[in-house]
Amino acid sequence: METGTERNVEQLSGKLADVIRDMVMEKKTWRELAYKYDVSETMIAKYRRKAISELTVLYQLREQTAGAYFLS
C-alpha cells in the first residue's frame, strides 16, 4: 500500500522523484546516487534541497485542504 509520503514523492518534478526514492526508501549513499544519475554529489545535494522545497509546498497544500474540509 502506498503511503501519503510515497504519493508526495511521486509528485516531485523531473528526476527528483527517482533520486529521493533511491535516497530515502532504498537508502543509497550520495556517492551511489551520484554514480547512478551521472552527476556530482553537489548536484545530489541540490536535488535534495529542491525536493525538500517542493515537498514543503505539497504538505502545506495538504494541510490547507484538510483544514478547509474540517471547517466546512
Image: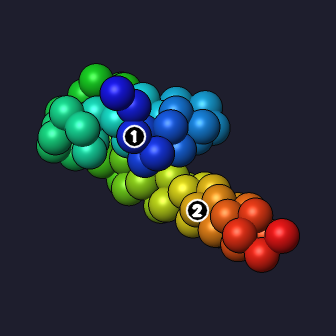
Q: Secondary structure at mark 2?
A: helix
Q: Quarter-wise, where is residue 60 in the image?
A: bottom right
Mark 2 nearby-residue class (10 Å; few <14, some 14–19, many ≥20): some
Q: Looking at this view, name the residue that lies furthest to the right.
A: 72
Q: As drawn, is 2 to the left or to the right of 62? A: left
Quadrant (top left/top right/bottom left/bottom right) for the N terminus: top left
Quadrant (top left/top right/bottom left/bottom right) for the C terminus: bottom right
Identify the residue shown where x is 51% and y is 52%.
51
Residue 10, x across and y down, in percent: 52, 33
Residue position for label 1:
3
Q: As drawn, is 2 to the left or to the right of 67? A: left
Identify the residue shown where x is 39% and y is 31%.
2
Residue 57, x across and y down, in percent: 65, 63
Nearer to the camera, 30 or 22: 22
Q: As drawn, is 53 to the left or to the right of 24? A: right
Residue 40, x across and y down, in percent: 34, 42
Q: Amino acid at mark 1?
A: Thr
Position above or below: 31 against 67: above
Position above or below: 27 against 15: below
Mark 1 nearby-residue class (10 Å; few <14, some 14–19, many ≥20): few
Residue 37, x across and y down, in percent: 36, 26
Position above or below: 44 against 53: above
From this viewpoint, is residue 46 visible?
no
Residue position for label 2:
59
Identify the residue shown where x is 35% and y is 35%.
21
Scheme of image coloration = rainbow
Q: Secondary structure at mark 1?
A: loop
Identify the residue shown where x is 16% and y is 40%.
27
Q: Earlier in the sequence, mark 2 or mark 1?
A: 1
Q: Mark 2 and mark 1: span between their CA atoms?
A: 13 Å
Q: Amino acid at mark 2?
A: Tyr
